[in-house]
């Protein structure tokens, strides 16, 4: 895609680099982004969010349609997106259903496709802006979405909300954990996986070990994200606190029961000390924007100091109002 190889570092709208607003006025805005330059409406009314539904909702904008990378519904946004059409992906994130998008009649499309062909096809429907890497740079992608749709102040306020939540939660965790460790394990119908330090900075690492500064257990330090566990591996799982994510599908519940019933499970420090939190929804950890990251913080607090959750939320809401969100 344009700018990917010709320039040094990431293009605008990718990694830590913000999109560039080149021109504003006369009802339009010109945006330089990860795929090039696009003229978009100054106040888009029908945004097709193939990416960025979380960020849009976080700044008070309800998309006209939405999708996410792997085709699974973002459960943590379910109530906010009730009634909003969902655009299916034909062959993964880079190939959305074009007919469904046409039916939405969008005036702006947000996507993270790296496919030039898909980008050109989408551009025949409506102006397209490409944003990349919101899993690690979720603050910047929130600011980018705000700049693109003309809601900069609201985006800045949402980042202030998140940063306040991080600071308040970190204070609680520093006091309550006392240097103890935490890990997250996901249970699927066929496996259970420990999420450690992802070399690509995605999923669990940015919030749990980055923003919140929680210590990793030794086993997580040795593994990349989504490393498959085994009963023998559980013998080495030295986490003092553990969040176990298992959805409501029969296969996942069976696998969870198998783990809980295994004699090795009782030897995990977190299990012995009653410091295990089981959650049924995982999407806000797996593919979130800034609202998802905020909900992940709630999970961590629920595992360590549940009585602190409402106070931390209240501090974040005060910051949001004071910043004009």
Image (tube, rainbow, N blue to C red):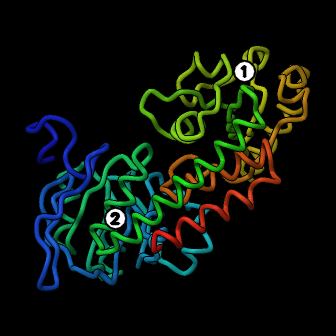
Q: Secondary structure at mark 2?
A: helix
Residue drawn where x is 67% and y is 43% of the image: 171
Residue drawn where x is 45% and y is 74% of the image: 324
Residue ID for mark 2: 145
Q: CA distance from mark 1 to mark 2?
A: 41 Å
Is 313 located above or below residue 221 in the figure?
Answer: below
Residue 205: image location, x then y, percent: 54, 35
Q: Is residue 10 left or right of residue 142?
A: left
Residue 191: image location, x then y, percent: 68, 32
Disc on the earlier residue, 1 or 2: 2
Q: Is residue 28 visible?
A: yes
Nearest to the observer: residue 209 or residue 66: 209
Nearest to the observer: residue 212 or residue 72: 212
Residue 84: image location, x then y, percent: 49, 78
Residue 212: image location, x then y, percent: 60, 39
Q: Is residue 107 left or right of residue 266?
A: left
Q: Residues within 10 Å of mark 1 (few under 14, many from 20)?
A: few
Residue ID for mark 1: 230
Q: Is residue 279 left or right of residue 95?
A: right
């Amino acid at each position: 895609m344009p700018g990917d190889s010709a320039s040094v570092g990431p293009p605008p709208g990718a990694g830590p680099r913000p999109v560039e607003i080149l021109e504003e006025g006369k009802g339009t805005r010109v945006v330089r982004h990860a795929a090039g330059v696009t003229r978009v409406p100054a106040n888009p009314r029908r945004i097709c969010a193939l990416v960025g539904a979380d960020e849009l909702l976080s700044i008070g904008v309800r998309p006209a349609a939405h999708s996410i990378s792997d085709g699974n519904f973002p459960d943590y946004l379910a109530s906010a997106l009730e009634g909003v059409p969902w655009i299916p992906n034909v062959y993964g994130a880079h190939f959305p259903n074009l007919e469904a998008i046409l039916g939405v009649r969008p005036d702006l499309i947000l996507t993270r496709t790296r496919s030039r062909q898909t980008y050109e096809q989408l551009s025949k429907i409506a102006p397209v802006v490409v944003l990349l890497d919101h899993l690690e740079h979720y603050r910047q992608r929130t600011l980018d979405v705000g700049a693109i749709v003309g809601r900069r102040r609201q985006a800045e306020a949402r980042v202030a909300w998140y940063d306040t939540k991080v600071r308040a939660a970190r204070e609680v965790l520093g006091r309550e954990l006392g240097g103890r460790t935490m890990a997250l394990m996901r249970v699927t119908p066929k496996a259970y996986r420990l999420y450690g330090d992802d070399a690509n900075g995605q999923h669990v690492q940015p919030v749990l070990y980055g923003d919140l500064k929680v210590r990793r257990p030794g086993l997580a330090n040795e593994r990349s994200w989504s490393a498959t566990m085994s009963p023998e591996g559980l013998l080495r799982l030295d986490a003092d606190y553990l969040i176990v994510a298992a959805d409501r599908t029969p296969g996942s519940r069976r696998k969870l029961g198998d783990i809980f019933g295994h004699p090795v499970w009782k030897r995990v420090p977190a299990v012995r000390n009653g410091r295990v939190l089981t959650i049924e929804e995982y999407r806000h950890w797996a593919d979130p924007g800034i609202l998802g990251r905020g909900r992940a913080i709630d999970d961590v607090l629920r595992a360590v100091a549940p009585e602190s959750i409402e106070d931390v939320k209240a501090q974040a809401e005060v910051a949001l109002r004071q910043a004009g969100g």
